Amino acid sequence: MQRRLMYFFKIALIIQLFIGISAWAGQDASKLYLPGDITQEQAHQVMAAAVKKAVDNKLLMNIAIVDAGGNLKAFMRMDGAFLASIDIAIKKAKTARSLNMSTYELSKLTQPGQELYGIEVTNGGMAIFGGGELIKNKDGLIIGAIGVSGGSVAEDMSVAQAGAAVMSK
Amino acid sequence: MQRRLMYFFKIALIIQLFIGISAWAGQDASKLYLPGDITQEQAHQVMAAAVKKAVDNKLLMNIAIVDAGGNLKAFMRMDGAFLASIDIAIKKAKTARSLNMSTYELSKLTQPGQELYGIEVTNGGMAIFGGGELIKNKDGLIIGAIGVSGGSVAEDMSVAQAGAAVMSK
Amino acid sequence: MQRRLMYFFKIALIIQLFIGISAWAGQDASKLYLPGDITQEQAHQVMAAAVKKAVDNKLLMNIAIVDAGGNLKAFMRMDGAFLASIDIAIKKAKTARSLNMSTYELSKLTQPGQELYGIEVTNGGMAIFGGGELIKNKDGLIIGAIGVSGGSVAEDMSVAQAGAAVMSK
Amino acid sequence: MQRRLMYFFKIALIIQLFIGISAWAGQDASKLYLPGDITQEQAHQVMAAAVKKAVDNKLLMNIAIVDAGGNLKAFMRMDGAFLASIDIAIKKAKTARSLNMSTYELSKLTQPGQELYGIEVTNGGMAIFGGGELIKNKDGLIIGAIGVSGGSVAEDMSVAQAGAAVMSK
């Protein structure tokens, strides 16, 4: 019973949250960021889809979302997820946006002997393994990126792609 | 109508999110973090209360939550909120936890001629103005901290306190 | 005779040290850190076991211990031990805790062509070779990590493991 | 009874520790560091005296000791002591040694309008408030420094001075 109450409490909070934001957005803030950039509400949807994918697959993830300017928009660390992955998730998102490719694609270009070998020491440290994916809107415009860290590269990629997919369909 | 559908879609997503996490927590992850540390679900509640306060007062905020170890747990930047405040919000939360006091209290100790003048250049940069508050549980145990940046110091503090208050009552 | 006096002086100091701490712990400080996290007294035991192992094997080591939050708890550099190993020992301990694996395990995942190749440039520099080990309590809960640097990787690992073993048995 | 056993176990460990080190020092390591530099055994004595002072005054401190080269020799964080003070204690010790004065003396020279105003942003961040003290041997030779952080400046200084005093008398 108490659990049920908690449950409705949480939903109520979140409803208030979204209603408030809807009312607010488009007013005073409208001159402060580019139209089309990922919004807080969209970041929420991307985050929720990524977390759902992680939970469904019993993964403990750090999830970071950056906007079109490569700046952190949202972040969450699931309970028990790696501490190192705070920075890695953020770097994966930033790296993906700042090179406009997934960090998995980048990983192939940065091996010894490949073209971008050594790039990871620039920009204060880049993430050169999979788990960073671009977030595109329905028109294919890049509006941000998502970085996921906590599992294997394949797992990180699947969670990041599940998050990014919400915006492109 | 479409708006209404979106609305229920969002709630459904979030419900799944919390149910999933509830089932997951306390199982495999239980050896990976100390019991009592702020959880993802608690961080959500703190974040929601802080955002609600910001929305109610028409403020555009960056909000960061760290755990008892000072490590980033959750972050959100509201649409149009300052880019500089990404780092400031995170530093405010880390600073509050790492000195076990609000950054407003700290601000008084760090003025020229005061005891801790100059402390801000340690720890890779500390935030020495208000907006970082400790998060304590009902027993008074420190379980994390919240940092808010985007408005005046008084506004930042009010939002941070609104977030932290959720855990202590 | 003088040597013998010095000897008892040292023991007396250390006894006072431990008695004092035992009386102090659990009083005013009890709201300031999570129960279960590695204590000063436990860190002492881990450090003593690691140093003993180093001495037995005529090794000159830097030894660092971090808590569950990845924050430095104790450090010691043996006379003549490498200066570079100050940072390496600390990074090994932090790296182990922040990825919840020994840095030896990590070393296999970070070779060219492997999944986590390049991870070392994140988090302000990670240690990706052996010598960092998790510290678990008797229940298997991770309460910190130990990093050792100064010898070969095998030597570093043996000293780190000797230290960590004290807490898990 | 069990407590008593634990007690002797601890002392036994520490005795082995010191005996081991005494046998070891002066052999292979003798070409690796300057004669007269602070030794592990001396650092232990300084640390023990500082911790005793802290315990006697019910203070929760971070204590760092650097050698004559300004490199970290020993560190300890008491249970519940500030996380921020890890870096601050280390920086106090390094700052004291690298300017050959206590950080309290330095604090007077670094106020607005004073000669060294602004020095704190050099050297990757210096500590410009009291709590860092030089460690000198009986002849007045500087053999290292101690940095203490966790209380008021006066408390930090008293603990640091108690530690350093062991070497000069």
Image (cartoon, coloured by chain):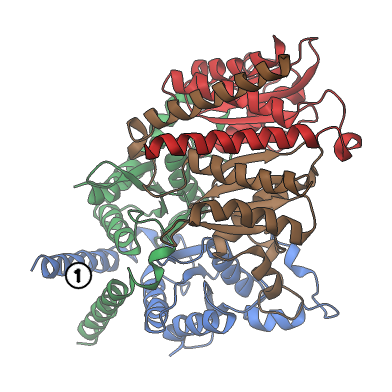
Chain colours: A red, B brown, C green, D blue
Judge by depth and name the residue closer to the eye, C51 or A62: A62
- Which residue is pictured at 39% across the width and 53% down the height? C61
Residue A144 visible in the displayed image: yes
Q: Is residue B162 above or below residue C154?
A: below
Image coords of residue D17 (percent x, y): 25, 64
Asked if one can make out residue D84 in the rendered structure from this viewpoint, the answer is: no
Residue displayed at 20% across by 83% down:
C4
SS class, disc 1 = helix
| Chain at tag 1 | D
Determine whether A3 is above or below B16 in the image.
Answer: below
Please state, as top left, top right, bottom left or bottom right, where the N terminus of chain D lies in the image: bottom left
* Residue D115 placement (x, y as % from top left): 83, 79
Foreground residue among D144 and D80: D80
Q: Which residue is mark 1?
A: D11
Question: Between C69 and D128, which is closer to the camera in this rendering?
Answer: C69
Side (left or right) of A9 relative to C7: right
Q: Is residue C50 above or below residue D41?
A: above
Residue A128 image position (x, y, % from top left): 62, 24
Q: Quadrant of residue D70?
A: bottom right
